[in-house]
Image (cartoon, rainbow, N blue to C red):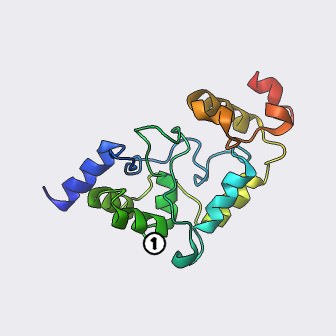
């Protein structure tokens, strides 16, 4: 199998067995915090703060892979966040450590290292976080729709605070009526 075919196979395989994580999806999901066209205020402030940490020098970055927000934490089909690898490229400590520890295969590593997003992404985690947090206290109608969609898809969110839930789960600034 050629290197290119191995990268394509890794991208198609989704999750890797044995507690690993699959290659990024072909395009960042519609709620990806790295996408320029995702509304502000979708995710909890702490989720946006995580993005800034990957802008640091590699030695200071988090050691874990960044999973796509569309999949439950324990799901067998979990993947790396396509926006994460598209924004930060192969210079991610978590990506390299996952390869060295055997949590991802060489093919999955290559798929992530060579990934190019087909949609516009922010140029850094800090840019993405600034955008996402701009309306964190008052997400608009578009954000309300995205939050609702994620909440229906992710069964584990009832136990976590990953999605922004201002005013005890209500969207403010007139968006609550539109989301209802």
Point 69% across, 60% down: residue: 49
Picture layout, residue 18 above or below residue 124:
above
Q: Nearer the viewer, residue 102 or 173?
A: 102
Q: Residue furthest top?
A: 180
Q: Is residue 147 left or right of residue 21?
A: right
How crowded pointer 1 is (Cα within 10 Å; few <14, some 14-19, many 20+) is rated as: some
The reply to whether residue 28 is visible in this rendering is yes
Q: Which residue occupies the foreground of this view, 171 or 80?
A: 80
Residue 173 position, x and y percent, is 87, 37
Q: For mark 1, what is the residue?
A: 91
Task: From the top left corner, tell me how far across and down residue 107 is, in percent.
Answer: 27, 57
| Quadrant of residue 163 within the rendered picture | top right
Asked which quadrant contains residue 168, the reply is: top right
Query: What element does badge 1 sit on?
Result: loop
Q: Could you say which is closer to the camera, residue 46 or residue 37?
A: 46
- Tell whether 175 sits left or right of 50: right
Name the residue at 75% across, 26% down: 179
Residue extending furthest left? 1
Residue at horizontal 58%, vertical 52%?
35
Residue 92 visible somewhere in the drawing: no
The total of numbered circles placed on residues is 1
Provide residue 158's location: percent of width, then percent of height. 67, 32
Q: Is residue 48 above or below residue 17?
A: below
Q: Residue at x 75, y 54 (%)?
A: 133
Is 18 displayed left or right of 126 in the figure?
left
């Amino acid at each position: 199998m050629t290197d290119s075919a191995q990268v394509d196979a890794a991208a198609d395989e989704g999750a890797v067995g044995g507690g690993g994580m699959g290659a990024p999806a072909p395009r960042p999901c519609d709620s990806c915090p790295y996408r320029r066209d995702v509304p502000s205020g979708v995710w909890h402030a702490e989720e946006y703060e995580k993005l800034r940490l990957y802008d640091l020098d590699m030695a200071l970055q988090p050691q874990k892979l960044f999973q796509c927000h569309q999949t439950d934490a324990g799901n067998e089909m979990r993947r790396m966040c396509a926006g994460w690898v598209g924004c930060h490229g192969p210079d991610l400590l978590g990506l390299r450590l996952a390869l060295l520890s055997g949590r991802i295969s060489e093919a999955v590593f290559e798929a992530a290292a060579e990934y190019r997003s087909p949609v516009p992404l922010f140029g850094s985690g800090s840019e993405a976080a600034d955008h996402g947090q701009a309306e964190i206290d008052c997400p608009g109608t578009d954000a309300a729709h995205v939050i609702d969609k994620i909440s229906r898809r992710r069964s584990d969110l009832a136990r976590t605070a990953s999605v922004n839930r201002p005013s005890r789960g209500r969207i403010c600034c007139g968006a609550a009526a539109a989301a209802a």
